Amino acid sequence: MTEIAHGAVIVLPGEAILSRWWRTLDKVVLFAVVLLFAIGILLGLAASVPLAERNGLAPFHYVQRQAVFGTLAFVVMLVVSMMSPQLVRRLGVVGFVAAAVAVMMLPLLGTDFGKGATRWYSLGFASVQPSEFLKPVFVIVSAWLMAASTEPGGPHGKTISFAILTIIIGFLAMQPDFGQAMLTVVAWSSVYFVAGAPIILLTAVIGAVGLVGLVAYNNSEHFARRIDGFLNPEVDPRTQMGYAIDAIREGGFFGTGVNEGRVKWTLPDAHTDFIIAVAAEEYGMIMVLCIIALFAVITMRSLLRLCVERDVFIRLAGTGLTVLLASQAFINLGVAVRILPAKGMTLPFVSYGGSSLIAMGLLMGCLLCFTRARPQAEIGDHLLSNGFR
């Protein structure tokens, strides 16, 4: 006997794949992602033109590239969302191995593009940041390991995933990329928490992260400079943070008007890390609140649907991916209003960036797959299938 999660969805024999996919998909979340991407294109039309002019390119060069990357991201998202959770898990393991090797090879083959951090592979026509792809597939692998540990005779999945996490953090710190390292820890911790980790153990992990941060502060000039700038009560108006704060203040509630903003001409990362400053200045707090609301809808709907999911792997992986998306958005927004130190992190689906867009498309594809309506076994059947007799 079965019951249906996420509403009364009837499984029709012989139904076409596309029809079943559309009927079981969370269309509200899909629509929210489409709106975020549309907002990103709108803001890109304003924010990227000055950059193109400085680089001697066509005015809408970066907007066109963002449209291409966004299209690829949507194709990835839709294709992955049509897959079965088992296939997503298998592909996630393969993707994790590839992404992990790519991150480990960065010190030898990567480039920093003059930014002081070796995070990219240069392909000539484009660049790839493997850490963006590593985050979602690592969440899937961690969820798989922890779900397997709940089965009789299963592996010590929590211990193995923690060991993998430690290795990943070490290589990310070598770049250095402490922002991505922190995001990875947050996502893994959320999976561990839902899997039943003791509070004492999670507290120890948080303490270890703090200790690593202290070591990084004392040994990395790049990291220390950002922390010192954040702790300094005075903001230099000639820095990126100073320009961003002035732009947000200038925009007020309704904004200065379309294409009337000035921050895009002074901020070098206006189209990426500080895209929200452009939104706040030209479209006001209304636009910022709309963006926050869209991320909140994606987060809350995904978590609510996962709450009734009885497959352990799907519940763990879906939670980790949701927390990963929400945390990255929170960090980007928090940096812009100076409640967090600068991290160099994009706003998902809104900021310019090929690797970020496609990786987020992969993440959302997995999340839409995991939150699709599907028949759920009765709780008694679920317990019996896991050997509780």
Image (cartoon, rainbow, N blue to C red):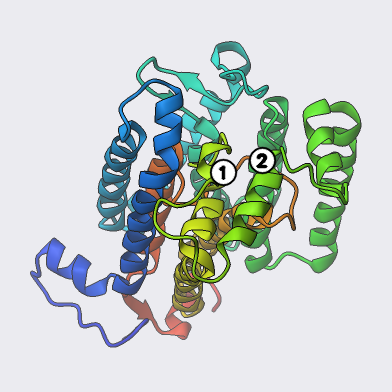
Q: Nearer the viewer, residue 264 or 170?
A: 264
Check disc 1 and give the amino acid type.
Answer: Asp
Direction from residue 202 to residue 57 in the image, left or right: left
Q: Nearer the viewer, residue 199 or 233?
A: 233
Residue drawn at the location 90% of the way across and 40% of the way down? 214
Which image quarter holds the N terminus? Answer: bottom left
Q: Name the residue under label 1.
A: 273
Q: Residues within 10 Å of mark 1 (few under 14, many from 20)?
A: many
Q: How far across and how far down the image is residue 347, in percent?
A: 51, 51
Q: How crowded is mark 2: few (under 14 residues within 10 Å), some or many (20 or more)?
A: many
Residue 157 shows in this picture:
no
User: If you read the primary sequence from the N terminus, does the residue marked by circle 2 or circle 1 appear first?
Assistant: 2
Q: How far across and how far down the image is residue 42, in percent?
A: 35, 53
Which image quarter holds the C terminus? Answer: bottom right
Q: Dot 1 lies on which element?
A: loop
Label annotation for residue 240: 2
Q: Which of 219 and 95 is in front in this view?
A: 219
Q: Nearer the viewer, mark 2 or mark 1?
A: 2
Q: How far across and how far down the image is residue 114, in percent?
A: 61, 18
Does the residue at mark 2 contact the one at mark 1 (Cβ under 8 Å)? Answer: yes
